[in-house]
Structure formats: structure tokens, C-alpha cells
Image: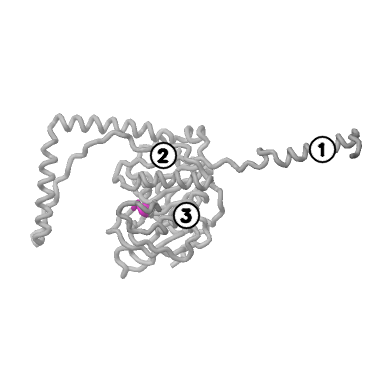
Amino acid sequence: MAPFSSSNCIRLLLVSSLGVALWNPQATTAAEPKRVVVVTVTTGFRHSSIATAESTLQKLADESKAFTVADSVRQPAVVVPRKPRKPAEPKPDADEKARQKYAAELKRYEAEIAKWTPEFEAKAEALDLQFSAELKEALAKLSPENLKAAKIDGVIFANTTGDLPLPDKEGFVKWVEEGHGFMAMHSASDTLHGFPGYLDMLQGEFAGHGAQVPADLIAADKTHPANGGIGDAWELKQEEMYLIKHHDRTRLRTLWYLKHHPNKVEETGYFPVSWVRNAGKGRVFYTSLGHREDVWSDDLNLPNRVNPPETSKKYQAHILGGIQWALGLKDGSTEPNPSVQ
């Protein structure tokens, strides 16, 4: 064995130091996941799929490690009774089935309206005030100051509806435009109808829908992350397909669309389903899909499943790609493509 000289000792120390540098865990740690806030509050129609949406987004965060749900804005637990509306009388030429349905609805209405004593109505009004106060408190998380303080990278509106009392609506849009991500699913376009700043940012407003139908979607961009690797076409067995207004194709890039009215196949044209766009330095991703639980979840044991789990997995890939793109983790074009037919 060679003598343990001072030169050998120096050589050993150098090798040892190099080894420490090469195997330093801090040198190989992946970037921290992006921080998002998931918002599922509603002041309008509330989808039964919201709980499924929340769990699916958490699943995608856990599996992808691309983002973390840093916070959530959920519905207050307060239940506010709503005064029932009297059903419309059947038309003079209505058949017997329609008349029987009206009679049953009228009976239910009369039973419900009997509960609305002055005392009950006063209690409902008090609960409504409590709900509004708690909703405002929950949405305070979306003030520009709180978003910045919490180092939030993006906000997801999953099946929100109604005129949400954001603490600073203009400030929220500006926060997105400063370089943050905004990701929105399904009825996020049925949200903040009275605020043009939001509609301009999203470039889509809910204009109605018909019965749930099969959908044969066409890809306008097969390479965008939000295509989800699905390819040229995507067929769903059943979904609630929105009609969209406040939509300028020269200000966005279409990702998925229909070549015909969802409920009137003989009416051809361009019917948008999903798109992306830049809002200042920020990125906006929207998909109108996401009404049904079996679009969100690939759980084999999900009750009343019509769409197979493969459809749900495609949807998850679609929204995950959109989230990753909006958070700046993946590249994708936002060049408008209004010529797509």
C-alpha cells in the first residue's frame, strides 16, 4: 500500500468535496410546485359535480406535482331557504301527461308556500344576510393584496356561478394581467355576468344550453398542452354543452369546438368549447366541459356513469394541460386562429 502522504490527503479531500457537491440534495431538488387557489362558490345554480371537481383537482395536484392547492374558497355552510315559484299553467293544447305533471308541481308548491309565514320569511332573510357575509369573508382571499401575500401563482374557477362579491373585481383582473394564471371550467362562464372586465378577460359568457347530448369535438390545436394528447377528435357520450357569447375569435386561440349546434345538428357553424388567450402578461384557459360527475371523475364505481372512465381521464389530461400552460409550466401558442372551421 502506498504511504499516506500529504499530497494523497489533499487529493482525497478534493474527491470527497466533489462527491458532496455532486450528491448535494439541494442541487437536485425540483422546482417548488406552483400555488393555486381553487374557487367553487356559487350565488346562482350550484352543480352537483362541484365536490367531484374539488377532489379531481386535488388528485391532479397530488399526481402531477406541478401545482399545489394552496387554498380553497368554498361555499358557506349556511343553507338559505328559497321562496318557491308557482309553476306555469299548461297551455290550452297540453296533453294529459303535461296536465298531470302540472298538478303534481302545483301540489308541491302549495305545500312549500304554506311554510312561508312572516316568521319563516324573516328567518330566511337573516340566513341570507349571514350567507352573504360569510361569502364575502371567504372571497377576501382573492383580493390582490392577499393573493400577493400568499404568493399565489394562479386561480381556478371550477363551476362557479352568479355575481360573486369579489373584494376588488378590477384589481383581480389586473392581478391576472400582471403575469398570473386564470383557469376556468364549465359554469365559470356563467359567473360575473354584470362585470365586463371579467367577461373580456375570459372572452366567453354563458348564453344557454339544451338537453345533455353526445358531443363530437374537433381539435383546433393538436399540439397545445390543453389538447391533453387526445388528438384530432374527442367524443363524449353525454355532456351539457354550452352556447357561448361575448366571444371574439380574433382575441383567443380555439382548442376544441363543435362544427354544429350541440342540440341542432343541422345548424352548422363554429361553436366554441375550449380556448386559451393572453390577458396582459397573464394566461387564461377555459373549457365549457365539466357539468357531469362522470366527466370529472374516472372512478369505476361512480353512480349513474354514462361516460366511460377513459373520457374522464381525457378530461383530466385536458384540464391538467390547461393548468400547466396557464401557470407557465408548459408552452403553447396563443396565436388567434379564427379561420378554423
CA gap between label 3 and label 1 equals 47 Å
Contact, mark 2 vs mark 3 (Cβ under 8 Å)? no
**Residue at x 37%, y 59% (from the top left corner):** 308
Q: Is residue 293 magenta?
A: yes
Horizontal side of residue 265 vs 232, given as left or right: left
The tag earlier along the polypeptide, 1 or 2, is 1
Kindly report which numbered mark, 1 or 2, lies closer to the viewer in this rendering: 1
Kindly report which numbered mark, 3 or 1, lies closer to the viewer in this rendering: 1
Determine whether 262 is above or below 119 in the image. below
Kindly report which numbered mark, 2 or 3, lies closer to the viewer in this rendering: 3
Are there few (<14), some (14-19), or many (20+) residues within 10 Å of tag 2?
A: some
In the image, 315 versus 150, the foreground residue is: 315
The tag earlier along the polypeptide, 3 or 1, is 1
Determine whether 173 is above or below 303 in the image. above
Q: Which residue position holds label 1? A: 14
Q: Name the amino acid, label 1.
A: Leu
In the image, 250 versus 163, the foreground residue is: 163
The picture quadrant where one finds residue 32 is top right
Q: In the drawing, what numbered circle is on residue 61?
A: none
Q: Which residues are magenta?
A: 290-294
For the N terminus, which image quadrant? top right
Q: In the drawing, what numbered circle is on residue 169?
A: 2
Q: Name the amino acid, label 2.
A: Lys
Q: x, y (%) of residue 312? A: 41, 55
Q: Which residue position holds label 3? A: 317
